[in-house]
Image (spheres, grey):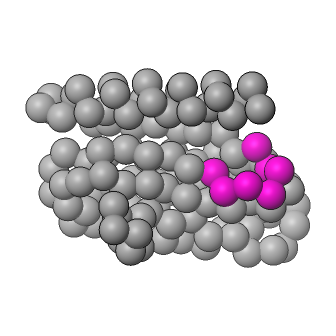
Amino acid sequence: MRGLKVAAAVGAVVSAVVLGSAGTASAASSTVSCPGRNVTCVNSFYHSSLSLVNVKADIYGSGTTSYRWELHRADGSIACYGDLKPSDASRNWNCNSIPVGQFELRMYTGTNTGVLGYTA
């Protein structure tokens, strides 16, 4: 339970930093570790301009099960997604024309650990 409280606090700090930088020209980015305990990994952020969001996802392991990351809009609809397997190399995807607003990157990794990040 203590780990979940820490993760929530880190998420709040990341959100505050991203929200605070909405008027700057530098890119916002964040990467979270996925614990691999049959939970969905979440990386929330505020996107401040109509532009590209680059997503980096990796699941560690050697299995052939296919997993999916999804970029969700505030209304829950999916703006962009990608599929990957633990045996794949780490890769990036580009989500084009993502509007201003609150977003969540989500990825279920089963019992595998991994990372999920973005640059916007």
Q: Main secondary structure of the magenta part?
A: loop
Question: Relative to residue 65, is residue 22 drawn left or right?
Answer: left
- Dividing the picture into quadrants, the one containing residue 66 is bottom right
Q: Is residue 10 visible?
A: yes
- Percent x, y for residue 118? 44, 46
Number of numbered markers: 0
Query: Which residue is drawn at the image coordinates 73% and 55% (left, top)?
Result: 39
Return the x and y of residue 21 as percentages of the image width and height. 22, 28
Q: Is residue 115 above or below residue 24?
A: below
User: x%, y% of residue 94?
Assistant: 38, 62
The N terminus - image quarter:
top right
Q: Residue 110 sits in which quadrant?
A: bottom right
| Residue for point 50% across, 46% down | 43
* Residue that appears at 57% across and 33% down: 8
Q: Is residue 115 left or right of residue 103?
A: right
Magenta span has 51? no
Q: Nearer the viewer, residue 109 or 94?
A: 109
Q: Is residue 5 left or right of residue 113?
A: left
**Residue 80 in sight:** no
**Where are the magenta residues, as a range?**
35-41
Instruction: Give residue 71's position: percent from left, percent from top.
Output: 44, 63
Q: Magenta stretch: residue 36 in it? A: yes
At x 38% / y 74%, what residue is drawn? 77
